[in-house]
Image (cartoon, helix red, strand yellow):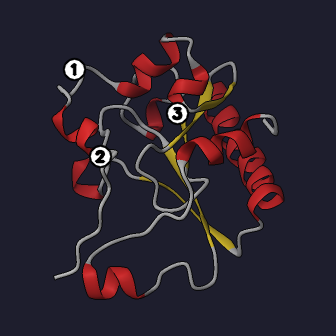
Amino acid sequence: MEQIWAPWRIKYIQMEKPEGCILCEKPKENNDALNYILYRGDKNFVIMNSYPYNPGHLMIAPYRHIANLEELTDEELLEHFQIIGRATKLLKQVFNPDGFNIGINIGKVAGAGIAEHIHSHIVPRWQGDTNFMPVLSNVRVVPEALAETYKKLKDKF
């Protein structure tokens, strides 16, 4: 059996999990670098996914705590998708991906990790970014630390 060491994960594993919604709480903390918040719009913000599928995996979320797409106001919806367009353009400039997965998981059954607060995912993709690790070992390798990705993207927003 293969073993992969990730000693930084023990802090997350052993910590008491916070109550409440991180997509509501993180913007209130006013510590954008620590929370990997890249951009704040009037109605939505951009936060890096702390457990990314690939470097540059971003989430766009409204500040309001709502679960469904139809609950967004026209202003929230317009800004939300404008930010997705801007973020995709920025990710192309910084990381030069070959494509993107962009999506919204609505409800736990659809894969939403934070089902009570709607958000969109943008995942940059490269030809060959899925290798033998997930197939043979059920392991995903993310080749860049969050702090490095944050530094590359923060000034661009």
- Residue identifier under label 1: 19
- 147 vs 53, left or right, is right
Task: Name the element at disc 3.
Answer: strand
Let me know if residue 55 appears in the view. Answer: yes
Mark 3–mark 1 CB contact (< 8 Å): no
Q: Quadrant of residue 66?
A: top left
- In the picture, the quarter occupied by the N terminus is bottom left
- Residue identifier under label 2: 9
Which one is earlier in the sequence, the residue at label 2 or at label 3? 2
Task: Name the element at disc 2.
Answer: helix
> In the image, what residue occupies the spot 69% across and 32% down?
79
Give the image location of residue 78, x and y in percent: 69, 35
> In the image, what residue occupies the spot 80% across and 54% down?
89
Let me know if residue 82 appears in the view. Answer: no
- Residue identifier under label 3: 61
Task: Name the element at disc 1.
Answer: loop
- Between the C-alphas of marks 2 and 1, the distance is 20 Å
> In the image, what residue occupies the spot 27% across and 38% down?
12
- Label 3: few (<14), some (14–19) or many (≥20) C-alpha neighbours in 10 Å: many
Which one is earlier in the sequence, the residue at label 2 or at label 1? 2
Residue type marked 3: Ala
Closest to the observer, 116 or 16:
16
